[in-house]
Every structure is written in C-alpha cells, then in structure tokens.
Image (cartoon, grey):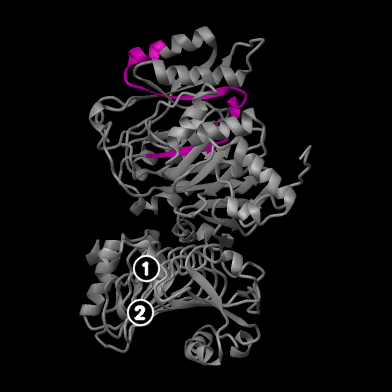
Amino acid sequence: MTENITKEKKRINNNNNPITINCAPNGDPLDYRVLNEEIHQSLNSGYNKIILNNVCGQRFIGASLQGDLEIEINGVPGNDLGIFMDGPKITVNGSCEDQAGNTMNDGTIIIHGDGGDVIGLSARGGKIYIKKNVGYRVGIHIKEYERKYPVIIIGGTARDFLGEYMAGGLVVVLGLKFLPNGKIIENDMSICGNELGTGIHRGKIILRTEEDLEPKLGVGAKLFTPDEIELKQIEIYLKEYCRIFNIPYELITQKPFKGVIPISKRPFAGSYCGQLI
Amino acid sequence: MNWENYTSLPEIFQNQRIFDGCGISGFLNIDGKRESGKKVRDMLCILHDRENGLGAGYAGYGIYPDYKDYYAFHFLFDDEKSKENVLSHLEKMGYIILSEAIPTKIVPNLDNPPIIWRVFYEPKKLKNTSDDEQIISLVMNINANFDGAFVMSSGKNMGVFKGNGWSHEIADYYKIEDYKAYMWLAHSRFPTNTPGWWGGAHPFNLLGTSVVHNGEITSYGTNKRYLESFGYKCTLFTDTEVIAYLFDLLVRRHKLPISIASLALAPPLFNDIERMSSDFKITLKNIRATYRSAMLNGPFSIVVGQNSPKPTMIGLSDRKKLRPLVAAISNDENCIYLSSEEASFQRLMLNEEFKNEFKEIWHPKSGTAIIARLGDGLIRKGLEKPLEKIKLSIVGG
C-alpha cells in the first residue's frame, strides 16, 4: 500500500518546496501507522514542510518529531496530534480532536477551529493557539521549568476543569465568537465551566471576562486581578495570537482580564504525609 | 469471530478484563427519509482505532415498513433444536406472522455461524397485560431460560444486527447496506471489564429502545438491583443493558419526558443545584431523590434510539465528560448526527455526495441530553442549562 502512495507523489528534493500527501487516496482514509510512516519518509528525503490533505481522524500525527519542521493539515486530525513533539509547527485548517499537544516539549500547534477535550495534556513547553472553543480539562497538568514555559490561548470559551492540576505555564481564554461572515463578537456562552483551576499549584490562568468566577473556582485556586506588569508579560503571546488569526489587538483590550492562581506556594502541602516529602 | 456457542458467554471468559474505549455513531432523518446502512457504516468504521474486533452492531429504525404493526424479533440460535423450542413457545403465546432467516453473507473467518432468525409477531390480547409488557416478559424469559437462544431485538419496525467481530465484518455479515432506515445507531466495541461475545455486543435493545454505549457504568450493581425490583432481569454480563432497561422504565413505564429522564440518569451536582432558582432547586432535588438508584455513575457517552411515542434519538455523556460525544446537523437541518469523534463527519465529507453536508458541528455539554425527534427536529442541542426551556408547574412544594 505504502509503495503505491509513494508513486503518486512528486519527489522533488528541494527543501523549500512543500510535499503534499493525500491522506485518503481514492476516498479511503489511510491508517494512522501508514500515514505517520509517510511523514517520516518525507522528512528523511529532505522535505521540511509537509501538507496533509483529506486528513480523517488519523491519530498521533507529528508524534515525537524534532526540529524546524512545518506540517499543514487540511481535515480533522485524530487524537494526540503533536504528541511528544519537540519543535515543529503544526497548523490545522479546521478543528482537532482530543489530546492535541499531549506532553509536548516545544513547538507550536495552531488550530483554526475548535479544539476537543484535554488539549495540551501535561505539556512541558511550546504554544497551542486555538481560534474557537475548547472542551473539558484543557491545560491539565501543564508544567514549567526554567526556560520551558507552555502557553495555551483559546479564542472562544472553555468548559469544566480548565487548567486542572496546573503546575506552571499560562492558559488564556478570550471569550470571542467568530461569525461565519468573518465578524468577531463577544461570545454569549460562559467563558469557562466549573472546577476552574482545580488542584492548581503553579502557573496562571487568564480570562477575559466580567463574569463572576468565584463560584466556579476549583480546590486550591483563587482569583486575582492581573496588574500592568503581568499583562505586559502576556502581551507578546496575545499579539502573536492576534496576528495568526487576524484579530485586531484593540478588541482584546476592550474587556478586563481576570486571573486564577494557586492559593499559596504549596496549596496541598497538608494533604500529604509529612515524612514522605 | 469463531465461537462454539453464540448465545451464552463461555466460562473461560467470565472473569476476563480488558481496558479501552468504544466507538459510537448514529443519525436521524427528521423527515423520515430512509437511508441505506452504508452511511452509518462509513461513520463507524473510520473509528477503527477505538475497537479491537470483539464486537460491533447496528440498529436500524424503519427497516420493516411492510410489517410495521408487528413486533420484530431478531434471534441468535446456537442450533435447530433451540430454534424449534423458542418458535413453539412463541406460538403458544401469540401469533407468528412471518418466520424466516435473516439474510447473511459468509465472511471468511466465520466457520460455523449461528442461526440468525427473525420473527414478526403479535401477542395474544390479554385483559390485564399490555402487549408491550407481554413482549418484555417473553424476551426476559427467553434470554434467561432458553438454552441456545438469544433475543437481539424486539421492537416494532426496527432491528438490531450484532455480533462478535470488527465493525466492517459485522456490516458485511448482515448486509447492512441492503437495509434502509430513517434512524441508525452503530457501535464498535473495545470491551472493558466484560468480555466480548455475540450477545454482549451493542446495541442493547428492549422493545423500541436501543442503546449504544462507550464507557463503563460503575453504578451497575445499584442500577441492577433497582431494575430487578421492577421485574427486569440483567442476564447479559455487561453494564450497558441497564441503560436500555432504565430508559424503558423511566420513559415508557413512568412516562417521564426524555429531557427529565436524562436528568435522572445524569443529574447536576448538588453544588450546582444549590445555586439555582428555587423552583429548579425543588424539581432537581426531587428528581435526584426519586431516582437516586437510577443515576448512572462512571464514564459514559451513549446514543439511545426509541421508536415510541415518536422515533427519537438521544445523546448523553457523563457529568464529568470522561467520554467523547460530538454532534452535527446537516445544511438542510434534516439530519442530526452523533458520533464519538468528528472524524465520522469528515469521513462522510470525503464522499462527493456529502461534501457540503454539515451546517454546524458542536460538542454537547457533559450530562446534558441532545434530543432529536422525527417530525419535530432538534429539540435540545445539548448546550442548555438543566431544565432550561422546560415548562414547570410545581404542585405542593
């Protein structure tokens, strides 16, 4: 099967030209193992930009890839997009399924649609930018260390358990709504669900909203109002986000920001047996 | 896919444990347009990473328009003798309108296939028992007491086709593409906690209610005892059957509206109820108190099909959203789709016919039912607050 697909492609060994892979030849979607093997072969033969067309739920696209690579996806990539990825940039022209950016170390994932549940699970670095809404448990257990700083920005709204067990990094939710005619308005849905930041012990969640978030806070999380310096720190990411999705930056600053951080340096110190720590 | 008996669980499997998830799909045409099983087959088979070849099944509603007034039994028999036993029992209890083999295609890796049989049936009119009740006790009796026989489905104008194998094998085996239905449910199995066997494949059916389920019901023991007190017998070694019986109990027997029944199965947390207005608070607390043993705990996402009073498709996930469920609506708003993954919709769009099929694709909220009904359209989108858009009149209080 793999050989037939290889024949269909134009093999131009020129690093600057992208290679296109049809992920559903004759309307029949490839198995994820075959597709990932195709991606590896293309990279081995010198391409550093890959365009995947007709992607249909194939899992693990971009798994463990390293270096300065680019993957553009047309269609719906399956679970665990960019899992363990270390450096590449993945752009999805559409929505993605669950667990995109699972334990990613570095790189960028850009989703021009909705994200599923558990986006950025345990990410240790890199950026995940999602244009529209996301599901449950987004940013669960993302963590930071020295220069490693994972950032997740969501243009629409999130659901329950946002930033659950967060151990570092940044999650931003903007609460915008993108109409089919290109207009951008404020989203009428709640900015996030319940159990916001439950179990958080480092890092912060920033939400662009006037909503009362107090009843939604999870265990160990507290609200704060970000000051000028803190907003300045996230500005660089927000400006990059706005540039990618073509959103006027002034629109973002029209509404106040609220933040969620852990209640103390070690909110759960008392939950463990002292002798074990 | 090779088994010595199809209608009961071999002893060696009775304590087997395997862990992962299943794939579910379904759609409903609001105007009642009947479509071939190919569409639901495409939607399901793309989710092959969610199954491991230990069970798959399809339920079609509207497949027997010529016999729509009779109960359609789909049977699995191990041998001729068990078939004769069941058929002669049926003759005693009512009238067999038609009794015939369900056409199947022999697939390569199935040497000794079961006897797949269907019977269109009318029970005798009894003074104190309704037809539905008679059929239920028949089904429960056959599944529990007749060796070598298993009832796959027993509703009117619908049928379940299921077995132990990969989703594409089961679709081929039953020639799913030859049937036309206005509502299809489909399931591919990755058995968790219970082994894969023919009767244990989904959809689970009782009368017109069929359930496909991804997840596990940790409250199975509580639900089972509750159902047994109403005369249901749980004999299938799997947690999903309680969902089918609970829907039958709540909707058909207790006559709850589906939106309320779904609140009984996946009620809001008490913390959230406390923050609601007082009439909502009373209603929800009463639902929780009345149906505390009907509450489903554990991770699940389900699609339920019902054929009375009106054919309805319901999608529901657990309150903490531990299993996926995605919904979509077609451009002409005539077809409502549900699936475990968005890939099912993308798979349809690869066909020229469905290229611009979808108007909107969305993720319903956890513990919130999405309900679509034949003739009425999309009744609940799965994004509403509990009890929103429901007229309440509180008596007493």
Quarter of the image where one finds residue B385: bottom right
Residue B99 lies, in percent from the top left, at 47, 18
Residue A131 lies, in percent from the top left, at 52, 76
Q: Please, what is the three-letter code of the amino acid marked with disc 1?
A: Ala
Q: Is residue B178 visible from the viewing direction of this image?
A: yes
Which stretch did the figure color magenta? B56-85
- Which residue bears the numbered disc 2? A144
- Frontmost of labels 1 and 2 is 1
Quarter of the image where one finds residue A89: bottom left
Please tell me whether mark 1 sits on a helix, a strand or a loop: helix
Q: Residue at x 60, y 75 (%)?
A: A175
Frontmost residue, B57 versus A172: A172
Residue B309 lies, in percent from the top left, at 67, 33
Q: Earlier in the sequence, mark 1 or mark 2?
A: 2
Q: Residues within 10 Å of mark 1 (few under 14, many from 20)?
A: few
- Which residue bears the numbered disc 1? A269
Quadrant position of the N terminus of chain A in the picture: bottom left
Q: Residue A70, relative to residue B78: is it above or below? A: below
Please tell me whether mark 2 sits on a helix, a strand or a loop: loop
Residue found farthest to the top: B92
- Asked if the stretch drawn in magenta spans residue B65, the answer is yes
Chain of the residue where label 1 is placed in the rendered structure = A
Chain of the residue where label 2 is placed in the rendered structure = A
Q: Residue A14, relative to residue A205: is it above or below? A: below
Quarter of the image where one finds residue B57: top left
- Asked if the stretch drawn in magenta spans residue A119, the answer is no
